[in-house]
Amino acid sequence: MHKIRTINNISEKGLSRFPADNYELGDAIADPEVILVRSQQLT
């Protein structure tokens, strides 16, 4: 299972590309492998 942390509002259409049986998605994922950001200044 791959862990993906989302930083802000990502569309459900985009998130649906990550099947739930292979990916854990959310804004409170501990130790994520990937951080998915929708255009945002990070400083």
Image (cartoon, rainbow, N blue to C red):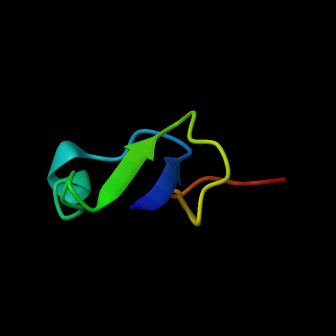
Q: Residue furthest top?
A: 28
Task: Measuring from the top left, give residue 4's x and y in whole percent.
Answer: 48, 56
**Foreground residue among 36 and 31:** 31
Left or right of 17? Residue 29 is: right
Q: How many marks?
A: 0
* Residue 25 seen: yes
**Foreground residue among 8 and 27:** 27
Q: Relative to 6, say whether 4 is above or below.
A: below
Task: Measuring from the top left, give residue 11's x and y in whole percent.
Answer: 26, 46
Residue at coordinates 58% horizontally, 66% vertically from top-left?
33
Residue at coordinates 64% horizontally, 43% vertically from top-left?
30
Left or right of 29? Residue 21 is: left
* Residue 38 seen: no
Q: Relative to 40, say whether 2 is above or below.
A: below
Task: Measuring from the top left, give residue 6's x and y in whole percent.
Answer: 50, 47
Left or right of 8? Residue 32 is: right
Quarter of the image for residue 12 reads top left
Q: Relative to 30, say whether 4 is above or below.
A: below
Q: Relative to 25, say whether 37 is above or below.
A: below
Residue at coordinates 56% horizontally, 45% vertically from top-left?
7
**Foreground residue among 22 and 10:** 22
Left or right of 31? Residue 11 is: left
Task: Measuring from the top left, give residue 24's x and y in whole percent.
Answer: 38, 49
Quarter of the image for residue 23 reads bottom left
Quarter of the figure with the N terminus: bottom left
